[in-house]
């Protein structure tokens, strides 16, 4: 009898009787995917916001140059 005791460990279910199994902390299993999702969602939101900001800036600049151009054309025609 070289084996001391048979433990009914189930690391995948975070269950350990021997106390020597390398179980991932319970919190990480529940929160890690959510954290990753939140990080991805936050990054996506920030990049979307940046794209929107750039688009607004570009649109504003385009409108401004357009109005200036129209103004110049109008003054020339007068
Ligand atoms: Zn164990």
Image (cartoon, helix red, strand yellow):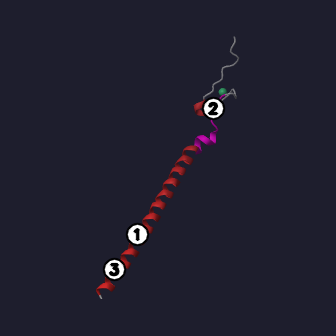
Secondary element type, mark 2: loop
Q: Is mark 2 within 8 Å of ligand 1?
A: no
Q: Is mark 1 within 8 Å of ligand 1?
A: no
Secondary element type, mark 1: helix
Disc 1: which residue = 59
Give the quarter of the image for residue 23: top right
Identify the image quadrant of the N terminus: top right
Disc 2: which residue = 15
Q: Residue furthest top?
A: 1
Q: Is residue 23 left or right of residue 57?
A: right
- The residue located at (45%, 60%) in the rendering is 51
Q: Is residue 66 left or right of residue 23?
A: left
Q: Is residue 41 above or below residue 73?
A: above
Give the quarter of the image for residue 60: bottom left
Q: Residue furthest left?
A: 77
Residue 42 is labelled as none
Disc 3: which residue = 70
Q: Is residue 19 above or below residue 76?
A: above
Which mark is in front, 1 or 2? 1
- The residue located at (50%, 53%) in the rendering is 41
């Amino acid at each position: 009898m070289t084996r001391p005791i048979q433990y009914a460990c189930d690391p995948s279910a975070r269950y350990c009787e021997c106390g020597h199994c390398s179980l991932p902390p319970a919190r990480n299993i529940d929160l890690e995917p959510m954290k990753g999702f939140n990080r991805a969602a936050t990054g996506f939101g920030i990049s979307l916001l940046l794209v929107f900001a750039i688009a607004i800036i570009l649109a504003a600049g385009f409108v401004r140059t357009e109005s200036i151009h129209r103004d110049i054309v109008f003054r020339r025609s007068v």
